[in-house]
Amino acid sequence: MHLEIAQRSYNAGDYRAALEQSNALYMENPGRLENLLLLGAAYYQLGQFDMCIAKNEEAVAIQPNFPESFNNMANAWREKGDIDRAIQCYEHAIQAYTYFREAIRIAPTCASAWCNIAGIFMQWGDFNKAVLYYKEAIKLKPTFYDAHMNLGNLYKVVGMCQDAIVSFQNAAQASPHNAVAYGNLGDAYYEQGQLDLAILSYRHATNCNPSYVEAYNNLTCLALQPNHPQALTNLGNVYMERSMLDIAVSHFMAALAVTTRLSAAYNNWAMIYKQQSLVNRGNTFKEAGRVSEAIQDYLQASVIKPTMAKAHANLACAYKETGLMELAIVSYKQALQLCPDFPEVTCNLLHALQCVCDWDDREEKFTKRSLPPSVQPLHAMAFPFDPTLALEISKKYADHYSLVASRFGLPAFTHASRTPMKSDDRASRLRIGYLSSDFGNHPLSHLMGSVFGMHNKDIVEVFCYALSQDDGTEWRQRVKVEAEHFIDVSAMPSDMIAKVINEVKIQILINLNGYTKGARNEVFAMQPAPIQVSYMGFPATTGASYIDYLITDEFVSPLEYSHIYSEKLVHLPHCYFVNDYKQLYKMDPDIFNTWCNILKRVPNSVLWLLRFPAAGEMRLRAYAISKGVRPDQIIFTDVAAKNEHIRRSALADLFLDTLKEYEERAVFLAMNPPELQTLTSRLRAVRKTCPLFDTSRWVKNLDRAYLKMWHLYCSGSHPQHFKVVENDTGYADCFKPDPAHVTLPSEV
């Protein structure tokens, strides 16, 4: 895959990296035409015009009437100021085109002439004409190997991978013993996520030519040369994609070990492979939560090659994950200096600046940059985006996880039959599965820890699937003890998790992560359950066609805004999604200005904030002072353990979460202590009876929602919006055979 890596580097503007990869391939196969062209192009971009000319001359020696090389040489001579030679080369290019046109006029059935002109159109960027001419060549000669291969490469360039696969298949049929055709076919299958077919194609390639150089960059080359670093790296990437992190790390370590044994003649290769392996191993460490080890690998990679933008970008992400925001910002900026056209890094930098409340030129940063394709869905909620744009961002992520799922090659699952529950048969209970990486010391378990054991066991059977290892906390232990079934699947690859879920015929599977850390959304893309639901971990839309419902409330997700959700909305009663600004990235200048106004209007008032992260404190204090707020009116405290956090929250007088009448309401209550005391007393009086504190009542309504979902499914209906209503006897028809004898959970 030297050539593919080189092409990607070239397209990303990293011409030196492209040159390194192309030179590595040149050492293996100096006569490969596409690589000679890429070498010439890389030298041209780096201003090494003599080398550009030399490589294109080598290409012309292989294929004398090759207009692409003449055109490239002409450009290089022009840059060197030798206009006469430039004109001479341009004339050669035009002459070649003229010859090919004349060949078609004289012999219109000459397939080679049509193919040659197609190549010229491709060089000129006229892909539509190139396709037409390649197709005409194939029509004249159906077994024309070169035409099929070139057409496949063209389709691949423009992103039409399925058409590329067909062309490479035709090329392989035209030349059954040609390793290159099978190698290209394998690459196309891999890009489409069809790993099994990719491996099969690579095996065909190595069978055709056991010494085929590109085989060393395919997964199956391990059978021929098990110590090839690129092969070990490729296999490590596959294991990482399948969440088999320990095995992935072992392959990256093996690749690193190999690079230290390469001879001096292969030093450049060794450096390239070592850098790749360090970055990949760092990614795996980071994914496994071993962030400090990841940082060390990224640092080593950036030392080996300081100009590798990806190493700096990954280092920044690792710093950010450990709360070292200032270091993260520096590394993101270094990555962008090396590669300005790096949308993912741009988005991550803006989010890091948001985390530390760096609001300088905020509006300009958002309007000047093309962000949406690389913004994470969770970050999109903190940015001033239109909701329809946030939906599109989520859809792109959902599509990505569908692609990841397809790479496992699983057949479609068989689901539980559409059989209504029987009121007199406990064995027919509704099987509910919760999948989460947050069964531990995490806000999700703080909020839902008691929920899993409160479901009505006469009608619901609960399975909790943990995507994270046991953290040894009371929060993990509580879920393990109270849930009817608790299964730790953290060490399993995603396809195995999906199989485990499907084997017990889970009927409704709930995604408690969404697009948050530790999620395995590819499991949901495999659709192991007939009904799939999003709740709690990610409050926005997933944009996923494989998620049927979003459990929400009618305030934050009113039906009139259902068009910005891909899921059907399920409204629970007595529910309201409360915003909070405890993490500083959730703030923006508008809300902070409102707080500053309140502080200035109310004598002796203070604003209590968390150092979350600590790097934001200095900026917020400076901003507040610039707005006329006294320094002692803002108090910062460190993030505390859950129990302490709850205890000290009682010391605050007022929590507000909506901008409507926000400032006036806060000032009124602060200036009228009796009114504030009345509200506080009312809350204390109903603490044990009002819906806000009645988890059991909430779980009963959640059971009703699940029953309704299953009833719609059994009736053959598509998912639809609905609202759960307490005391609604309509939920009795979720059972059979006699709804009249069903006893729903009692009301509080």
Image (spheres, helix red, strand yellow):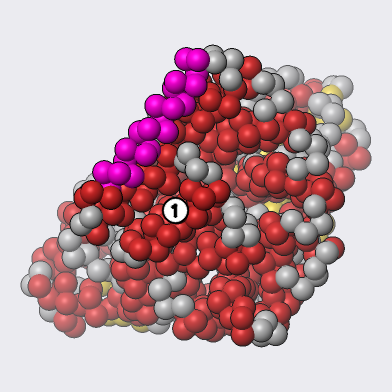
Along the line of sight, which residue is nearer the eye, 127 or 431?
127
**Neighbour tally class for label 1: few under 14, some 14-19, many 20 plus, Cα within 10 Å:** many
Inspect the magenta stretch and tell me whether residue 105 lies in it.
yes
In the rendered view, tell whether residue 323 sits above or below residue 524: below
User: How many labels were placed on the picture?
Assistant: 1
Relative to residue 92, is residue 292 drawn left or right?
right
Visible in this render: residue 362? Answer: yes
Magenta residue check for 318: no
Most frequent secondary structure within the magenta stretch: helix
Judge whether 722 appears above or below 581 on screen. above
Rendered location of residue 83, percent (x, y): 21, 50
The answer to whether any part of residue 524 appears in the image is no
- The residue shown at (87%, 45%) is 503
Vertical arrangement, residue 124 with respect to residue 455, above or below: above
Tell me what residue is drawn at x 71 percent, y 30 percent.
170
Q: Residue at image x 23%, y 73%?
A: 620
Query: Where's the C terminus, which quadrant?
Result: top right
Residue 500 rendering spot, x and y as whole percentages? 83, 51
Left/right of residue 385 with respect to residue 275 in the rendered view = left
Quadrant location of the N terminus in the rendered image: bottom right
Q: Is residue 175 left or right of residue 721?
A: right
Q: In percent of the image, x 55 and y 77: which residue is there?
A: 268
Amino acid type, label 1: Asn
Residue range (magenta): 86-106
Q: Position of residue 706 (x, y in %)?
A: 69, 37
Horizontal and vertical percent position of residue 439 = 67, 65
- Which one is in front, 495 or 25? 25
Q: Nearer the viewer, residue 407 or 398?
A: 407
**Image-based side of 88 in relation to 699, left or right:** left
Residue 175 figure quarter = top right
The residue pinned by badge 1 equals 56
- Quick one: SS at disc 1? helix
